[in-house]
Image (spheres, grey):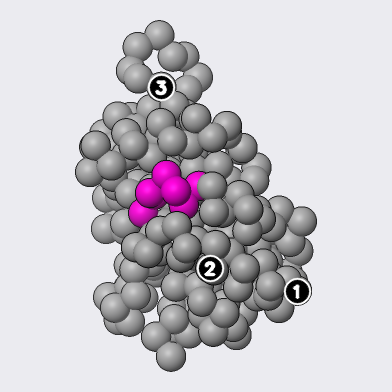
Amino acid sequence: MCCLCREVSIETGVNVVVCPPLPWLREASRAGSVVYAQHTDPIEPGATTGFHSLDMIKAAGGSGTLINHSEHRLGLWEIEYIVEKSRNKGMRSVVCADTPRTVAAVSALRPDMVAIEPPELIGRGVSVSKAKPEVITESVESIRSINRTVLIIAGAGITTADDVRKAGELGAQGALVASAVVKSDRQRKLIGEMAGALTD
């Protein structure tokens, strides 16, 4: 899939980032994809068995990280720590948040991107852009009142190019997708359609 994402990125000019499980990070990076970790722990290298630091992720070829995904929540101080450390190490940060209020709080930490992602819609095949469009519009409004530069991404239930297009109409600048692409038997076509929807 990494090669497919790279191909689509080159063809469309849309940044397509892959977030593989940690054991596949180096392989994905070597395939030429832009690679972010699915999670990072707020730690420094040392006695940290079982944890993953930004240094490990960078050494494996990662250039950024997801933070606070609904399946791996963190406290606000932990999010702030990882965002700041990412910035200091020249890595990108994508902070996930579930409500307009939480989105506003994390955007104040100045991550590179904020992903709006109501957890009840993740993997359900019903997109946030259609089921809860107000979550996107209210989040965009909240973010822009605090941070004018952060990129806004919509996630949760996005399965089609139309879902991505609708999210863009509501103010999102990108999409966070997983199961729709991973489970698809036409991955290349779907990734291309979704990237194309961002350029429409």
Cα distance, mark 2 to mark 1? 16 Å
- The answer to whether mark 2 and mark 3 are in CB contact below 8 A is no
Q: Marks 1 and 3, how far apart in space?
A: 37 Å
Q: Residue at x 50, y 19 (%)?
A: 50
Residue type at mark 1? Answer: Ala
Q: Is residue 44 left or right of residue 108?
A: left
Note whether residue 60 is visible.
Answer: no
Place of residue 40 in the rendered image (x, y in percent of width and height, measured from the top left): 45, 34
Q: Is residue 145 left or right of residue 167?
A: left
Q: Report if the CB atoms under discs 1 and 3 are less than 8 Å apart.
A: no
Which amino acid lies under the numbered mark 2 shown in the image of this protein?
A: Val
Q: Residue at x 54, y 84 (%)?
A: 169
Q: Which residues are magenta?
A: 106-112
For the stretch drawn in magenta, the main secondary structure is: loop
Q: Which residue lies most toward the top here?
A: 47
State the residue in front, 199 or 24.
Answer: 199
Classify mark 1: helix, strand or loop.
Answer: helix
Q: Position of residue 153 (x, y in %)?
A: 50, 65
Numbered circles on residues, count: 3
Which residue bears the numbered disc 1? 131
Residue 134 x/y as whole percent: 69, 72
What is the C-alpha distance between the residues marked 2 and 3?
31 Å
Which residue occupies the foreground of this view, 38 or 77? Answer: 77
* Sequence-earlier tag: 1 or 3: 3
Image mark for residue 43: 3
Q: Is residue 80 above or below residue 118?
A: above
Which residue is the extreme one toward the bottom? 200
